[in-house]
Image (spheres, helix red, strand yellow):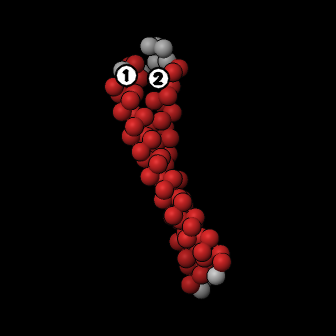
């Protein structure tokens, strides 16, 4: 296995990790948006009726998603430099 193949495998593994890390953020944002705009005070879970919980879910979930987007951009940049070589 060449160094280029090893780096390509590392990049693929990093993208999988980023996808796994991004999932809780997307779930939090989705539930937060549901609680904010879709539930109208009658959510399937009582926590989704509390505005402070909903805002916290949106902030935390959005932060996780932003961090994962940043990491994904860095990994894709590495992949592009690897493809140029």
Q: Report the side of 45 relative to 8 (left or right).
A: left
Q: Which sits in the foreground, 67 or 12? A: 67
Q: State the image coordinates of residue 73 (x, y, percent, origin top left).
A: 54, 60
CA gap between label 2 and label 1 equals: 7 Å
Vertically, is 44 above or below 32?
above
Give the residue drawn at x 62%, y 70%.
80
* Disc 2 crowd, CA 10 A, few/some/many (<14, 14-19, 20+): some
Residue 36 disc label: 2
**How far from the left and from the top, in percent, is residue 59?**
39, 37
Q: Residue furthest right?
A: 84
Residue 80 visible in image: yes
On screen, residue 25 above or below 43: below
Packing grade of label 1 (10 A; few <14, some 14-19, many >=20) is: some
Q: Are marks 2 and 1 in contact (CB under 8 Å)?
A: yes
Could you tell me which residue is drawn at 49 percent across and 18 percent down? 39
Q: Quadrant of residue 83?
A: bottom right
Q: Is residue 24 visible?
A: no
Q: Picture quarter containing residue 58?
A: top left
SS of the residue under disc 2: helix
Q: Which residue is mark 1?
A: 51
- In this view, 62 is above or below 31: below
């Amino acid at each position: 296995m060449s160094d280029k193949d090893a780096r390509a495998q590392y990049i693929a593994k990093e993208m999988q990790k980023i996808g796994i890390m991004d999932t809780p953020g997307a779930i939090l944002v989705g539930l937060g948006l549901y609680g904010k705009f879709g539930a109208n005070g009658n959510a399937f879970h009582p926590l989704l009726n509390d505005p402070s919980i909903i805002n916290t879910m949106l902030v935390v979930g959005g932060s996780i998603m932003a961090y994962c987007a940043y990491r994904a951009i860095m990994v894709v940049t590495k992949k592009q430099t690897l493809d140029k070589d």
